[in-house]
Amino acid sequence: MAEEGKAEKAEKPEQTEETEAKKTEKAEKAEKAKEKPKKKSTLKEFRDKTGIKASEELRERHKKQRQIVKAIKEALKSGPKTIPQIVSETNLESKVVTWHLFTLWKYGEVREVEEVEGYFTYELAEKSE
């Protein structure tokens, strides 16, 4: 039994040396990671380097979409409304209002309130801070 205890003690220093070696190796890797400069791969940096910019058509489309979303949100500021009510207030096509409204609903910016005359009413969702 005494010999077994000595054998166990003999293994422990080796295990400790292995553990220390692993810790040292991890510390060296961490230091190398800190030394590496972070790569910036943003779209803006890409545009600056390449000179490629969004087409005028694309910019106009995004501008129009932002205007539509703004009009829908403005209509809902006065209270819950159905899609036909939003269409009449914003003078937008029904399919455009429906598409943008469901997108706003999908991302939690509007929510369904109740059903009125076969249509759901929608209102702006409260923003959590």
Image (cartoon, grey):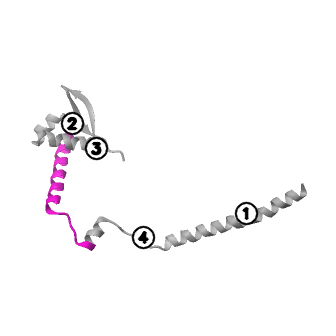
**Residue 7 x, y percent position in the rendering:** 83, 60
Disc 4 and disc 2 in contact, CB within 8 angstroms: no
Q: Which residue is mark 3?
A: 109
Q: CA distance from mark 4 to mark 1?
A: 36 Å
Q: Measure the alpha-carbon separation of dots 3 and 1.
A: 57 Å
Which element is circle 4 on? Answer: loop
Q: Earlier in the sequence, mark 2 or mark 3?
A: 2
> Mark 3 against mark 1, which lies toward the viewer?
1
Residue 70's x, y, as percent? Answer: 19, 48
Q: Which amino acid, mark 2?
A: Gly
- Nearer mark to the viewer, of 2 and 3: 3
The reply, left or right, for residue 22 in relation to residue 97 is right
The residue under label 4 is: 38
State the image quarter where residue 61 is shown.
Answer: bottom left
Task: Give the alpha-carbon distance from disc 4 to disc 2, as whole Å.
Answer: 47 Å
Closer to the chain start, of discs 2 and 1, is 1
Residue under numbered circle 2: 79
x and y percent of residue 56 in the render? 14, 62
Q: Earlier in the sequence, mark 4 or mark 2?
A: 4
Assess whether mark 1 and mark 3 are in contact (beta carbons under 8 angstroms). Answer: no
32 versus 59 height, above or below: below
Q: Callout 2: few (<14), some (14-19), or many (20+) C-alpha neighbours within 10 Å? A: few
The residue segment tinted magenta is: 49-76
- Identified at 19% across, 34% down, the residue is 81
Q: Which residue is mark 1?
A: 15
